[in-house]
Image (spheres, rainbow, N blue to C red):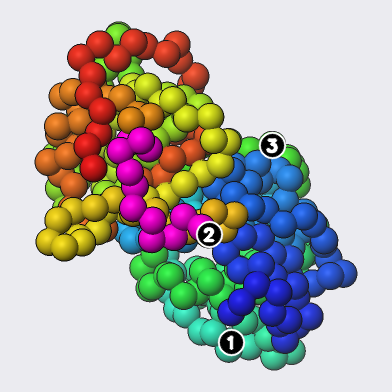
């Protein structure tokens, strides 16, 4: 669907950037850099959402619903790719908290309990009626226990999930908060268990533990704000390093490893707001903005395969801000 297409329910949308499901619920400015907008999720108005799937194009999916903030976050391969406002259960119909899996999917579901009411893009969490689905978003909890999502967000989420995907629901809708953690890393693993992302400590330059997850796609986050690099495989952090990132571009960029002419080549992926990047080869001048500890670089390079993705961002990577350590034995990445 092209940007500006009118939807059946009267929704205005710039797909892949930010949308609102009904002009009566919310209006808002378009976001041009989804990862950066998504980390400021307290600014989302009722019905608004961000969808940036190219940040992590493959890997396991996890959905986190924060009832206190009335926000849903979607992670793929351990990296946040989407955020949306929600409406959960009202008084007397509280949405249950816990770790769930998607039990059933039905794009055209209708309620057997509430007058055959439509529940588009329903993804069932419990057999007694709790589900994720498109629904009303007045800016406060108003459902009968389900988690209401923006219509187009619900459709996009439906397209990337499968049965068994983990959904974590936490918080208390009665205690509404508008602040948010700004890390792009998932706070849970694929089983819904809390993950604490440990910062580098004791002057260590990097950490590399590929044995934690040996198979699956690599997602690499280069945080300009933290001067850190994090490597994830199948949603699990397997590496973390200090870095020297000399890049004053405030936006986000995604590059992916492809094979061209029989040789590996990094190329840009066109994020919304950076569509001119699409397909452009990454040149040496760009790579020269990054310096990494030599040992870490060699280990990551050996693990790279086509499809690996790098996100360069100003967002944080799940650790408290640290002093910027000097990269002593360093190397610049090669094309």
State the image coordinates of residue 231 (x, y, percent, origin top left): 30, 39
Q: Earlier in the sequence, mark 3 or mark 1?
A: 1
User: What is the spatial separation of the Cα atoms under label 2 and label 1, in whole angstroms?
Assistant: 36 Å
Q: Is residue 309 visible?
A: no
Is the residue marked by circle 1 packed among few (<14), some (14-19), or many (20+) residues within 10 Å?
Answer: some
* Residue at the spot of label 3: 179
Is the residue marked by circle 2 packed among few (<14), some (14-19), or many (20+) residues within 10 Å?
Answer: few
Q: Is residue 322 above or below residue 77?
A: above
User: What is the spatial separation of the Cα atoms under label 3 and label 1, in whole angstroms?
Assistant: 33 Å
Q: Is residue 184 magenta?
A: no
Which one is closest to the eye, mark 3 or mark 2? 2
Is the residue marked by circle 3 packed among few (<14), some (14-19), or many (20+) residues within 10 Å?
Answer: few
* Residue at the spot of label 1: 109
In the image: residue 39, left or right of residue 278: right
> Depth check: 61 or 98 in front?
61
Residue 275: assigned label: 2
């Amino acid at each position: 669907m092209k940007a500006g297409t009118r939807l059946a329910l009267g929704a205005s949308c710039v797909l892949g950037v930010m949308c609102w499901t009904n002009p009566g619920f919310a209006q808002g400015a378009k976001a041009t850099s989804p990862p950066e907008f998504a980390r400021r999720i307290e600014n989302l108005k009722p019905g608004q959402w961000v969808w940036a799937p190219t940040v992590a194009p493959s890997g396991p999916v996890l959905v986190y619903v924060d009832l206190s903030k009335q926000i849903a976050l979607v992670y793929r391969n351990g990296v946040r790719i989407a955020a949306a406002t929600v409406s959960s259960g009202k008084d007397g119909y509280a949405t249950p908290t816990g770790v769930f899996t998607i039990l059933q999917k039905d794009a055209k579901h209708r309620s057997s309990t509430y007058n055959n009411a439509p529940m588009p893009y329903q993804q069932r969490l419990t057999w007694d009626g709790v589900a994720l689905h498109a629904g009303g978003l007045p800016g406060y909890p108003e459902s009968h226990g389900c988690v209401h999502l923006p219509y187009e967000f619900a459709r996009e989420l439906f397209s990337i999930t499968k049965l068994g995907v983990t959904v974590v629901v936490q918080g208390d809708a009665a205690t509404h908060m508008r602040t948010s953690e700004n890390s792009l890393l998932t706070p849970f693993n694929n089983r819904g268990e809390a993950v604490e992302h440990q910062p580098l400590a004791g002057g260590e330059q990097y950490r590399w533990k590929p044995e934690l997850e040996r198979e699956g796609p690599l997602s690499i986050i280069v945080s300009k704000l933290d001067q850190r690099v994090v490597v994830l495989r199948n949603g699990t952090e397997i590496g973390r390093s200090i870095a020297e990132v000399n890049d004053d571009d405030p936006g986000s960029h995604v590059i992916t490893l492809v094979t061209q002419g029989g040789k590996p080549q990094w190329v840009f992926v066109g994020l919304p707001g950076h569509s001119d990047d699409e397909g452009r080869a990454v040149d040496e001048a760009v790579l020269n903005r990054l310096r990494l500890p030599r040992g870490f670089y060699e280990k990551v390079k050996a693990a790279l395969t086509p499809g690996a993705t790098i996100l360069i961002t100003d967002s944080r990577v799940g650790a408290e801000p640290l002093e910027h350590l000097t990269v002593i034995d360093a190397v610049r990445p090669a094309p």
